[in-house]
Image (cartoon, rainbow, N blue to C red):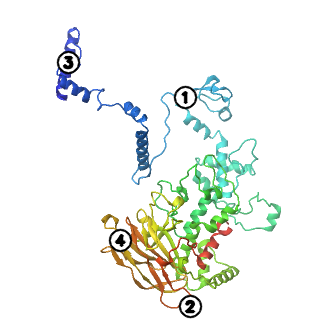
Amino acid sequence: MAKDWDSQMASHEARVKSATASGSTPPDAPKGFPDKDLEDIREIVATSKGPINLTEQTVRNFIQNDNQLRGQQNALIRALNDVKANHPGSPARAHVLLDNDKPKDSYVMVKGNPGNRGAVRSRQAPEIIAGSARKAFKEGSGRLEFAQIIASKDNPLTARVIVNRVWQHHFGEGFVPTPDDFGLRSEPPTHPELLDYLAAQFVEDGWSLKKLHKLMMLSATWQQSSDDNPRFAQIDPGNKLYWQMNRRRLDFETLRDTILYIGGRLELEPLGGPGVMLDAEPYPTRRSVYAYIDRNRLPSMFQAFDFVNPDLTTGKRNETIVPQQALFMMNSPLVIEQARNLTLRADFKAKVKAEDRVQLLYKLIYQRDPSEIETKLALDYIRGEYGVTTTGAGAQAWEYGFGEFDPKANRMESFVQLTQNNGNAWVPGGRQASPKVGRPSLTAKGGTPGNGIQHGAVRRWTARRDGFISIDGMLVEPSKKPEDAVRGWIVSSGSGLIGSYLPQKKQIATKLPRVLVRRGDTIDFVVVGKGPFAWAPAIRFIEGAKPGEVTEWNAEKDFSGAVAGKQMEAWEKFAQVLLETNEMTFVN
């Protein structure tokens, strides 16, 4: 049919050309096939009236009039945009501003009222910047020309503002203490000649920020110690003459990265990529520069540490000292986990003497050796903590959560304690519950894993003394569906992976006759997969029990709807104390 219609149209065009050449009247265009059946088909397939050839506007109108279709379309668009933004293979993007082909001049809005228009004014720079002899912009919208005027040698204000902010970055306080206000309401510069010199040098060096940073950091002023000098302090108590480097507190992003780095968990690679929720569990280990900022829901830890309002332009953050900051350092799982990671380091465990362990922690956290008094206080604290009986009984020795075992590193990459008990099982509560995590759960006899290897179900037991234990149990896979297969691991914080199990014929014995544990070590029973499982291990100390000590733990019998908080052993507590001090949070 299509060929017949094309042939008919080609014949008509030939007749039109012939008639035009001879000066006669061109024939009318054919309106359809003489055959009615063919014409009906042609109208459906080849004309704009047919359902096949719908215009984009017709489809858009149809969707807008149907709430269900509009919701489905919006969901598909969001999913497509998420793939474009977050997929590892998506190309890098940047916002680009394009001028209109024909830029327009604007009316003066009298007293700022859009309904009260004044005269039309040409596009030009403000007189306060360009002077009274300013000229109208001629290149496009004028944005480029305006930018060139702002960053011109004839406009010293720009260079001075930039130099003031860079100086504030390095010294904590600018020459002008209000970086957003260089006007009449601001204080005059404390060192006007130095500000002018640095601004002139900055322009002479081609507006290079790198050279400006280098110039300041190679100066004797920046390289000074922050040690006190009573004589100078009496003459200049506010350090206006820069006779010492001011002690400066780390901002929250730097503090978080420092704690993760000390714990050996700061993720430096890969560079770039989408932002991450810093308060999501398990806590991400990427650098804080990749934090996802939701203007409508800032995490409480951001607000406690003077994070700026993302809706405002802020040249200098406020610095406050409030109880919430200390409570974060004391109770945050992020800080507690990094304190625990310090004591799990191979070089820490290799130290036999307590004095050597104290010295290593000081070097890792403060980059210095402890003094004799600090060493004595630390040893007294450690001995005092170990002198307290903290033997866990029954349910107190168990924790229930989800996390990830890293086979390459041979350790638990993360562990998040479940916070809600529904009377039968421990399940995610609050922000833990999400489609990404799934529904990990733990009951007295077993449970179900979460989504993927990152959210395996984890039953954790903590040793309260040194010794050898035996582990007994049976990992059972009750589902008969192949897609519901599960896999189990037993992971020791001290020894790494000590057992790997893939149920054959739907069950497998999980027996370990002799495992060495140290006080504070954890034994994790990890299960990943898609189906339910049954696994209620039993642990028993083989030898060396003192009178009255608990020596046996059974996951099924000890299961409880209320568990004690995470128990920290003495060295972990000591490491956390060092992380909470002013010496850690201030640059000295």
Inter-mark Cα distance, 2 to 1: 91 Å
Q: Which residue is mark 4?
A: 477
Among numbered discs 1 and 3, the one appearing first in the sequence: 3
- In front here: 313 or 496? 496
* Residue lying at 58% horizontally and 86% vertically, measured from the top left: 353
| Residue 97 x %, y % | 50, 38
| Residue 192 x %, y % | 74, 49
Marks 4, 2: nearer the viewer: 4
* Residue lying at 64% horizontally and 61% vertically, measured from the top left: 250
Q: Which residue is mark 3?
A: 12
Instruction: Check contact, mark 1 vs mark 3: CB within 8 A.
Output: no
Q: Is residue 409 above or below residue 483?
A: below
In the picture, the quarter occupied by the N terminus is top left
Q: Is residue 64 left or right of residue 225?
A: left
Q: Amino acid at mark 2?
A: Lys
Instruction: Check contact, mark 3 vs mark 2: CB within 8 A.
Output: no
Disc number at residue 546? 2
Element type at mark 1: loop
Q: Which residue is mark 1?
A: 138
- In front here: 68 or 514? 68
Inter-mark Cα distance, 1 to 3: 52 Å
Among numbered discs 3 and 2, the one appearing first in the sequence: 3
